[in-house]
Amino acid sequence: MEPASFLDIVTNFKAVFLDSYGVVKNYNGLIEGVPETFDYLREKGIAIRILTNDASRSQEQQLASFHRMGLRGIELEEIITSGMLAKQFLKHKIIRGKVAYLGTENAAEYILQSGFPSVPVRDIELDRIDDIAGFAFLDDEGFDWNTDINKTVNLINKKNIPVIVANSDRLYPVSKNDVAVATGSIAQLVESILNREFIHFGKPDSQMFMYAYDHLNEVGNGNRAFERDEILMVGDTLHTDILGGNKFGLKTMLVLTGNTRQEMMDVLIRSTGIIPDFIGESIVK
Amino acid sequence: MEPASFLDIVTNFKAVFLDSYGVVKNYNGLIEGVPETFDYLREKGIAIRILTNDASRSQEQQLASFHRMGLRGIELEEIITSGMLAKQFLKHKIIRGKVAYLGTENAAEYILQSGFPSVPVRDIELDRIDDIAGFAFLDDEGFDWNTDINKTVNLINKKNIPVIVANSDRLYPVSKNDVAVATGSIAQLVESILNREFIHFGKPDSQMFMYAYDHLNEVGNGNRAFERDEILMVGDTLHTDILGGNKFGLKTMLVLTGNTRQEMMDVLIRSTGIIPDFIGESIVK
Amino acid sequence: MEPASFLDIVTNFKAVFLDSYGVVKNYNGLIEGVPETFDYLREKGIAIRILTNDASRSQEQQLASFHRMGLRGIELEEIITSGMLAKQFLKHKIIRGKVAYLGTENAAEYILQSGFPSVPVRDIELDRIDDIAGFAFLDDEGFDWNTDINKTVNLINKKNIPVIVANSDRLYPVSKNDVAVATGSIAQLVESILNREFIHFGKPDSQMFMYAYDHLNEVGNGNRAFERDEILMVGDTLHTDILGGNKFGLKTMLVLTGNTRQEMMDVLIRSTGIIPDFIGESIVK
Amino acid sequence: MEPASFLDIVTNFKAVFLDSYGVVKNYNGLIEGVPETFDYLREKGIAIRILTNDASRSQEQQLASFHRMGLRGIELEEIITSGMLAKQFLKHKIIRGKVAYLGTENAAEYILQSGFPSVPVRDIELDRIDDIAGFAFLDDEGFDWNTDINKTVNLINKKNIPVIVANSDRLYPVSKNDVAVATGSIAQLVESILNREFIHFGKPDSQMFMYAYDHLNEVGNGNRAFERDEILMVGDTLHTDILGGNKFGLKTMLVLTGNTRQEMMDVLIRSTGIIPDFIGESIVK
């Protein structure tokens, strides 16, 4: 597949959904030229939504972070996180009792604040778990892997409660060459050990696309102004961004500023069968 | 978990989503007492949607079949099939060229009619596949397993095209004691052989729930009358109906008239970690 | 990894284990030059064993087939098939009752002859299965896929009996460009549907290597003449020949006359992590 | 299946293979009555081998531990560990360079001592890995999970080297009610993240059974005194002890003093399809 220019292609669309990490920013901060791309999209009247599987920080915190990095042309409601969907789920399904979690206090605060108390795994005593009503994998930080993963396995094994995974990503890059194990991998370890199936939020699941799509149409104007094929999903990862976008009926563009490197691109597309409609170097060209 | 009465429980909800096979009907036809249940729901003003992973027949055909079996109190738009979602996807994503398929001509007609030509796998010559632009697993009937599964493997291996699975069910019961391999299993065989990931439609994916939910709210009245926790999803299968309903934020009820037998129920819930909010014998009590 | 010459490399070893399909022969018959390679190995005093996952034919039949194709310098006891191991297992474990099977009558005859009666799936009546004491997946031919796969699923679901898979291969090439679904894939479909784990024979399992190794040493001479690192395993498939050989402690060589094509070789080694000690074009150079 | 008495059943055999943890000992030390069982077996002239997936300690250390717990009637050569097989593999396959490992120094010492230097993951600098020639998962202790799992992922991702797993167990019990994540699970996490396939040692793989069997026959007497069906494999875990024993052609007995509890036994046998020949309460009755 021949590389295409994002700035050209996007003019055929009324809205663009952007993955955050690997598309808008990376381990170095904002990708150079992104503020100019946002200005260009605004000028052309193309609606923007950022869809991120990062559940560690709230919309407000992610907005503040973009601002700090120098991306000012972005509004709170244009940021959609998998944590928001996890939070919405918990509000509907857990009626009473505490939610135990693996992750940072910050993630717990914004996801679990919805009216019920929460408790980090580290503070749980395994013989006193009567009041635990749910479990949430929130982040790969904020706990001690040496002890808290085992405690999590035992807790979930003892108590039959709903378990949610607020971020299904398996890996994330931490430098040009290195990666780190993400929340989704830890959750999958526990699923595999216990032969269980947890409730995952974030791309590629349709729920996040649906949320962005509905929001776009509600805010946009009264009548459904945006058809699915008028929206371009841009991402750096085949299994989340492109698979999810394809499945939801959006047009999709793979960019090469993140997880997928140029030299592996063809092999990965061929071997997974996940086919983007377009391939571009980045969103700044 | 103690069994509850569906007829009691449902009065706490404004809408009910019902799986078809194993809940409304089974291999014998309509489950006895179902027409009375529908009358009861109408009387109480509870909205009904049937969500089925059966992609072999169109809405119209499924409606006609319900009528033939003696269930008259059901409207066309109240039936939502995974085939409808597959059809919608194809309309958006496949631009030109033929869609090859595995399944009956009837399924092909209603799913693939959307403006592009289709061709059953049996009629494909593997050295003349330039014009094939997509592939669809539609049904477990309508083809010769001895030859057409191999042809499918070779076609998808040679040509990098979007592949959809219109019905992700693995098995279906054909009598009190016997089951048959369903479309989802055949697709998974090919995925596993080629190490590929196809695009699956149907429960437990959120897309079908979203479709039903949006439709309910559009038709219902102008303002969002139905909250998610005002809807009860009823199904006989943990991995599709209950997992999907739970994830979408609905309340869920497992009934024992289909795939899940009373004596295995506790073990299955325990071992999968998929926990319904309620368990009932059937929707007629 | 740089390609090496098999004829050079092999002189460093006292014995060579050869996969059959993709190394010695292919869909066209014997690979050109193989008889000369065998003469060369005999001349150098290098012991030969052929290790094949083909369970459809007996040692005698495979020998006759090699002879017909023009490979005469090979003895009966130098051919080791996964079917022999399956047969040995059945002799030890099934005490009384019939063994049901999916495959050709020929395969059934040589594998199941060991003193107990056998019955093809097609002749089974699902309500009369009291005397079925085991099940064997023998071959991908000799039955009707349209009916007998479903019968197999139901039989194994109803009756808790040992199930063996005499050939674990997933695919085999039937021409330069086309493949066919092999016995291992059909067995895996049933395992996956029923969430069961069958007993698989053939590479990469250690049992076949052990059988060949023990036999080599018994026949060779009284004292253990062959150390593991004095044996070279040559195969065309990473997941069976190379993984199995590596694990058993043999040196391994991947050749490019079968399943693994030159242009995909590096990617496959990199992505699977299965690393041969040598790579060669074929066993004739 | 009706429970049987081990002490009765075993008299029909010439040798018995015993799993260690869950059969001979548990988290409390030796299971009460085991020394008497060993005396009984000696008296009857039944050969004994202990087959353990515990790779953290050498034969000598395991022997010393049995002695400390009060089991004196056991010889060094009767203890077979998965670590011994891993060690043997490394000796044959890794020619030069260091082996990096995750585990205790003790495990590294006895497994990796074979002539090449080893280095714990913690001491590796990811930009200086030219001399790393292999990787070994040895134990779930002896490293910091917070940092060393990520380092392992990056090391194996950067460098295409053979990776071995010296103990494939997923979980082990640490008290009556609690379990801990074992080496096999950590290795599987990394395999799953990188989509790789490592080389696993230990039950259910045939290699360990073969080693014990060959040893038995070599030591026993000159002519092959022990047929496979004259050996009883006793274990507490279906997926390792029973599957492995069945596959190797041994008779198998599941005991209920470890991983498999009485109340789950039938469901587990039914759902996995792994069927022991006998079930017994323990080896002391």
Image (cartoon, coloured by chain):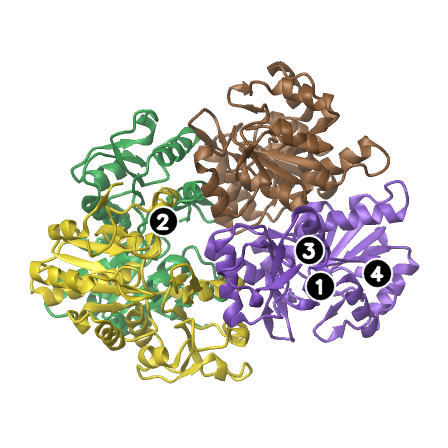
Chain colours: A brown, B purple, C yellow, D green
Residue B111 visible? yes
Between the residue at mark 4 and the residue at mark 1, the CA separation in whole angstroms equals 18 Å
Using the image, determine if residue D278 lies above or below residue C5: below
Q: Chain of mark 1?
A: B
Q: Disc 1 designates what residue?
A: B109
Which amino acid type is shown beneath numbered disc 1? Glu
Chain identifier of the residue bearing label 4 in the image? B
Residue at the spot x=43%, y=64% of the render?
A: C180
* Residue on which the image places disc 2: D168
Alpha-carbon distance for marks 3 and 2?
52 Å
* Up-down relation of residue B153 to residue A145 (above or below): below
Seen in the image, is C214 located left or right of residue B210?
A: left
Mark 3 → mark 4, Cα distance in angstroms: 25 Å
Instruction: Please report the residue visible at 32 percent of the width from the left and 82 percent of the height from the top.
Output: C113
Q: Which residue is mark 4?
A: B76
* Gap between marks 4 and 2 measured at Cα: 54 Å
Of badges 3 and 2, the one in the foreground is 3
The percent coordinates of residue A106 (x first, y second) are 62, 25
Foreground label between 1 and 3: 3
Q: Position of residue A34 (x, y in %)?
A: 61, 20
Task: Let me know if marks 2 and 1 both belong to one chain.
Answer: no
Image mark for residue B116:
3
* Residue drawn at 37 percent across, 57 percent down: D240
- Contact between marks 3 and 2 (CB within 8 A): the answer is no
